[in-house]
Image (cartoon, rainbow, N blue to C red):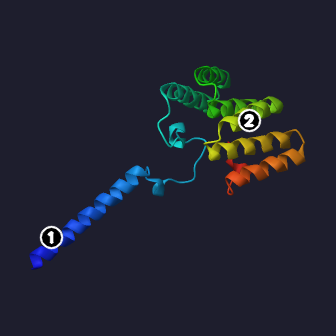
Amino acid sequence: DNEKTLKTTLLRRALLLFSLSLFLTLNHCALFKGKRTIHDPLIDFYKNDPPKHTLASLRLTEKGRGQIGEGNKAIAMESLNKALSIDPINPFAYYFLAKIHSDRNEHRESLGLLEKTRQYSTKFPFWKAQSHLLSAFNYRALGLSKQMNFHLKKAREFDPEIDWDDID
């Protein structure tokens, strides 16, 4: 009788462990992820596998993002523009081009690119929030507080914890 109880207990535990591992696998271990950042792998923002041309565009966007981090903004712009030639609705490429323009104090150019980011990031609320935050930053630099406050409010609608410190 003890042997049967032990087998039943072990079987239940094995089933529980299997269920837990399946849950974590299917949810990409979301329980262990911290707050998203603009440095996260772009593929992680997709719920399903994107088409091959989008994957190629994402690789070039990742490359461009890395080049920005290394201070090679001119080369990054080439990579990002190539990414857009492959997938003209890649919101991430538009965002990083906007970031370059913002860093160069070309705030109006940045704002135009951020409009494109928002247009194509409907499936990516994190990036919509980031685009509104960078827009707020640009409007602040232009001395347009009404527009700055509007975009900061919109950013917080998508991410209530977003703050100025989230701009790298």
Kindly tell me whether residue 163 is visible in this rendering. Answer: no
Q: Which mark is residue 119?
A: none
Secondary structure under tag 1 reads helix
Q: Reading the chain from its start, which is encountered first: label 2 or label 1?
A: 1
**Residue furthest bottom as drawn:** 1
The residue at 58%/29% (across/down) is 61
Report the quarter where the C terminus lies. top right
Secondary structure under tag 2 reads helix
Residue ID for mark 1: 7
Q: Is residue 32 above or below residue 126?
A: below
20 left or right, relative to 54: left
Report the quarter where the N terminus lies. bottom left
Residue type at the position of mark 1: Lys
The residue at 74%/41% (across/down) is 134
Q: Position of residue 114 (x, y in %)?
A: 74, 35
Residue ID for mark 2: 114
8 left or right, relative to 118: left
Q: Position of residue 166 (x, y in %)?
A: 68, 48
Could you say which is closer to the camera, residue 67 or residue 113? 113
